[in-house]
């Protein structure tokens, strides 16, 4: 994870997911170029990496998280499941 904060991981994951959603919407109506497909695949790989770091951070901070940040974490998990 490289010392990144929970919030930084959450923000990056949210940004990447938004970009991926927009790309998938575009793909629904227009064929993507090879470059766009490559970017989509790289972004998906990065989403997987950041998700793993995010989940690891959740596990490490479980006791603290329950006390201080349960609600935002629950919301992020719900967003990831959509």
Image (spheres, rainbow, N blue to C red):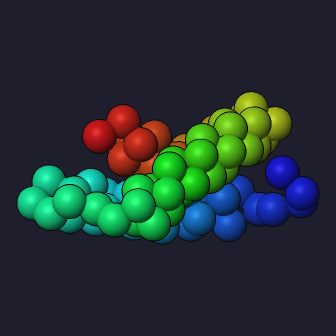
Tell me if residue 41 comes above or below residue 34 in the rendering: above
Residue found at x 36% / y 47%? 79
Q: Position of residue 41 (x, y in %)?
A: 50, 50
Residue found at x 68% / y 66%? 8
Name the side, left or right, on which 18 lies relative to 25.
right
- Residue situated furthest right in the rendering: 2
Q: Position of residue 22 (x, y in %)?
A: 28, 65
Tell me if residue 65 comes above or below residue 9 in the rendering: above
Q: Is residue 82 visible?
A: yes
Q: In which quarter of the view is residue 70 placed?
A: top right
Name the side, left or right, on which 27 lies relative to 39.
left
Residue found at x 49% / y 57%? 38
Q: Which quadrant of the rendered structure holds the C terminus?
A: top left
Name the side, left or right, on which 31 lies relative to 61.
left
- Residue situated furthest left in the rendering: 29
Q: Position of residue 25 (x, y in %)?
A: 19, 59
């Amino acid at each position: 994870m490289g010392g990144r904060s929970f919030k930084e991981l959450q923000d990056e994951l949210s940004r990447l997911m938004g970009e991926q959603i927009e790309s998938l919407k575009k793909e629904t109506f227009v064929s993507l170029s090879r470059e766009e497909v490559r970017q989509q695949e790289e972004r998906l790989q990065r989403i997987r990496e950041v998700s793993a770091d995010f989940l690891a951070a959740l596990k490490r901070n479980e006791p603290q998280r329950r006390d201080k940040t349960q609600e935002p974490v629950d919301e992020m998990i719900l967003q990831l499941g959509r």
